[in-house]
Image (cartoon, helix red, strand yellow):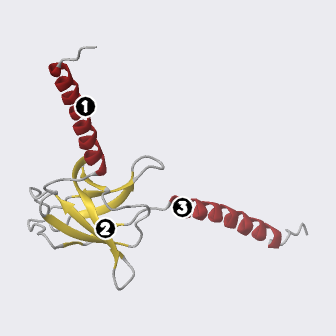
Amino acid sequence: MDRSPGRDFIVGLFVLAGLAALAYLSISIGGFTWHGHGGLKVTAGFNETGDLTVRSPVVIAGVHVGEVKAITLDKDYRAQVVLDLDSNLKLPIDTSAAIVTAGMLGDRYIELQPGGDEQLLKSGDKITYTESAMILERVLGQVVYGLTKGDANKSATTATKPAKSTD
């Protein structure tokens, strides 16, 4: 069988292109960026983060504007979340941050609501208006407990009510 060097070269290029595409996809899915998001790093304190993780998205009106860089505890046992945002953002100092869920049982992300103040957040500032994650198990527990507690109170009040006299 006679093999031409040109054909081997083309097959080699095809294999290299496939490996380069696989490497690119692996890096992209892993979330690695060469330049980072670029500059505006702010923190926000939350009582409960739920399943929020590092590299969770930060969005404004559904548009991806950054990601969570770190989650730590402060001395008061509150979660401090460091957000790495696009350096082109001009966020007012009264911007609020809320941890929300994508869908009913989806991943958590941070949604920012810009305020109306003229002063702008600078890198290193703290977002003071925050809304912690709502934990579905706790909400269901409160609903169930509230319903059973209400039923218990109802039966207790009807049982202790004196009967009307027909005299």
Q: Residue furthest right?
A: 167
Nearer-N-terminus badge (1/3): 1
Q: Residues within 10 Å of mark 2 (few under 14, many from 20)?
A: some
Q: Based on the displayed image, in which of its 4 quarters is residue 149 positioned?
A: bottom right
Q: Please tell me which of labels 2 and 3 falls first in the chain.
A: 2
Give 151 or 162, whichever is nearer the viewer.
151
Task: Identify the residue at horizontal 26%, vertical 37% (top origin).
Answer: 19
Q: Amino acid at mark 3?
A: Val
Res 92 → quadrant: bottom left
Residue labelled with disc 1: 15
Measure how far apart labels 2 and 3 are at the Cα level.
19 Å
The outermost residue toward the bottom is 75
Q: Residue at x 17, y 67 (%)?
A: 41
Residue 28: assigned label:
none
User: Taking 24 as reference, is 160 above or below it?
Assistant: below
Task: Please report contact status of discs 1 and 3: CB closer than 8 Å, yes or no.
Answer: no
The x and y percentages for residue 6 are 15, 20
Q: Is residue 14 above or below residue 143?
A: above
Badge 2 vs badge 3, beta-carbon distance below 8 Å: no
What distance separates the C-alpha of mark 1 from that of mark 3? 54 Å
Numbered badge on residue 130? 2
Q: Amino acid at mark 2?
A: Thr
Q: Nearer the viewer, mark 1 or mark 3?
A: 1
Residue 143 as seen in the image, left or right of residue 116: right
